[in-house]
Amino acid sequence: MKYRYPCTGNVGIRGFGEYLEREIAEPRRNIRLFASELKSRFGGACHCLVNSGSSANLVAAFAAAEKLKARGMPLTAVASAFTFPTTMSALTFAGFSVRIIDVGEDDFNLDVAELERMDPVSLIVPTHFLGFPYDVGRVKTLADRWGALVLQDSCEAMDVPVFGRGNYDGADFVTWSFYHPHHLSSYGGGCVVCGTPGDFALVDSVIHWGRACKCHIDPAMCKVPRGPGHEFTYDRLGFNVEMSELNACFGRWQLARWDSFEATRKAHYDTLLGLLRGCAGLKVWERPSGGSPFVFPFRVANGMDVETVHRKLADLGVEARKLMGGVLNQQPGFWNYEAGALANARALAGSTLFLGIHQTLSDEQVRFGAEALKSVLA
């Protein structure tokens, strides 16, 4: 179906051909430059580019597992009910036993109070779900008390500060996604942001086959004996998930317009909020302070079934979506994970949809979507 108001429009490519022709050069040039430009814009010691946000979480999970094994700690983790499936899969593949906990009441992020009542785990995996920041300070305080690592999934909240920017220096690994509906598109890609050069060397190795050579980072770090097998020595399990040079070039081209993209997203959110705040039968959320909204969530509170709201909006040409699959352990692939009652997450998932605020949408489309939603609820 072609929606008059889709969650995401088509990412523009006009002008990219000329940019590509000018910028493509020796192998890995754009990969190096994209990583450097991301560091300049967002902070963080090192940026490791991969082929998707899911790969970013996979690599970060394996890196975290290796660090914890070196400390002699068990591989135990906790994540919220609103965790993306490939994040949970990555933790499982890396050997973690994962417990799923609830989100806060009328909140999209893990319930820190429930987290504080838990037995300690070695890895906390919070998600800035839909671009709403979790309580970084409380989670970091708890992680320090437990001696745990923090893997922060920021795939839907790219502009939340990391590693020394603001008050959000609360993670060991941060992951981003450059999937085209997200904040920044590289037409497929992701990133693991590391806070230290040591973590960078570990993550880089996991991305590149588990290789031991560090000459491309710093020859002084490299301990592999010289000889014909120098570049072909592997000291850990690894993958082959680096971002392509072409995707990196497209990401650089998009990043140059980051400020206008982010301003448009926030303006769209504020437009929807202004038109829908106070609407009978509807719960909406203020734009997250210190966050970077991914979409505009709304909760149906007039007793109408969300499936009905979804269908009626579609009939009017408005695309709305549920909360990324909802409560994770209700999905058939994740029934066997340890979890509590998850009452808050179940209530939210059963009554909440979202509208798009992507930078590719026009103000006219956004206003049309708000008026359509009001008409459905009426």
Image: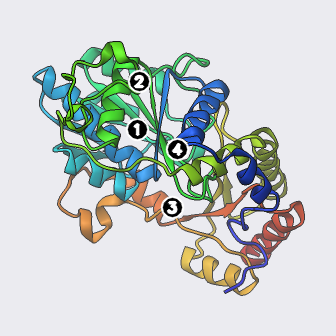
Give the Cα separation between the discs numbered 4 and 2.
Answer: 16 Å
Q: Nearer the viewer, residue 29 or 165?
A: 29
Q: Position of residue 346 (x, y in %)?
A: 40, 60
Give the Cα separation between the discs numbered 4 and 1.
Answer: 35 Å
| Contact flag, marks 2 and 3 (Cβ < 8 Å) | no
Residue sitting at the far top: 220
Horizontal relation, residue 232 to residue 49: left or right: left
Give the Cα separation between the discs numbered 2 and 3.
Answer: 40 Å
Which residue has dot 3 on it?
323
Residue sitting at the far right: 364
Would you call the spot at circle 1 few (<14 residues within 10 Å), some (14-19), or many (20 or more)?
many
Identify the amino acid type marked 3. Leu
Say if residue 5 shows up in the picture: yes
Identify the amino acid type marked 2. Ile
Identify the amino acid type marked 4. Pro
Q: Nearer the viewer, residue 278 or 86?
A: 86
Identify the amino acid type marked 1. Pro
